[in-house]
Amino acid sequence: MHEVVSSSVRPNSIGILHVGIGNIAAITGSLRRLAVKPVYVERPIDLHGLTHLILPGVGNMNELMLRLRSTKLDKAIMDFSSHGFILGICLGFQALYQYSDEGSCDCLGLLEGVVVPFSSYGQSSTNIGWSKIESFPSTHSHKSPILANSVLAHTFYFTHSFCVPVCSSTTHIVRVANRHITAASNHANIYGTQFHPELSHIHGRSVIQAFISLS
């Protein structure tokens, strides 16, 4: 099956946060399969000219936030959020919120909510595997433009020990050990997925394609 990127995607306009933490290779591979060569964002100046920024998953929250603050990328990302589109994945998704129990640290605060360990639910410490996600209808009158209804029939890959309880930005949920947690979120131009679209085959790439096609 051929994958075609929207003609609205400009060259050198899609960035991936690259501070030595995160699943950079897999996201880069997914974008290149979509005929996009991403820009690696290592310093605030690298954000200039970008329209979209992906915050990758995998890693430790405290270490991620220390690296963002030491490079002043935390402030730069917050400034970028006023005009650019942001997609956080797994750890990058959790970093969008206000506070994380992982490392007991403040995060970017672009979305309201906190990150908690699974142990706070009295459940096992890690969620790994393929799961279907569900739309969360209660607080949203709109549907997330990066998650079409067709993807709800497919499974996505999760691997994480911390999670975001259902909150005001939640658009999709996943059931883990008889509890619902946030699987995807959206507020204005800020998007997040707890699952890894870059590891979820063609249906995951359709999420990434929808994100980079936003304008």
Image (cartoon, grey):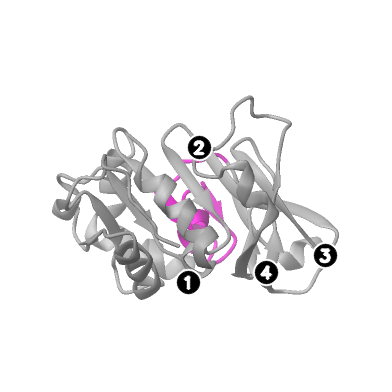
Left or right: residue 193 compared with residue 63: right
Q: Could you tell me how far apart the alpha carbons at marks 1 and 4 are, in whole angstroms?
A: 17 Å
Quadrant in which the C terminus is drawn: top left
Q: Mark 2 points at which residue?
A: 145
Q: In this view, does 213 lie above or below 99?
A: above
* Mark closer to the chain start, 4 or 2: 4
The answer to whether the residue labelled 2 contacts the one labelled 3, judged by CB atoms less than 8 Å apart, is: no
Marks 1 and 2 in Cβ contact (< 8 Å): no
Q: How far apart are marks 4 and 3 (CA)?
A: 14 Å
Mark with earlier residue (2, 3): 2
Q: Which of labels 1 and 4 is toward the front?
A: 4
Q: Which amino acid does label 3 sit on?
A: Ala
Residue 162, above or below 191: below
Mark 3–mark 1 Cα distance, whole angstroms, equals 22 Å
Residue 108 in view, yes or no:
no
Q: In this image, 11 relative to 17: left or right?
A: left
Q: Give the alpha-carbon distance from disc 4 to disc 2, as whole Å.
A: 22 Å
Q: What stretch is highlighted in magenta?
A: 87-112
Which residue: 54% across, 66% down?
200
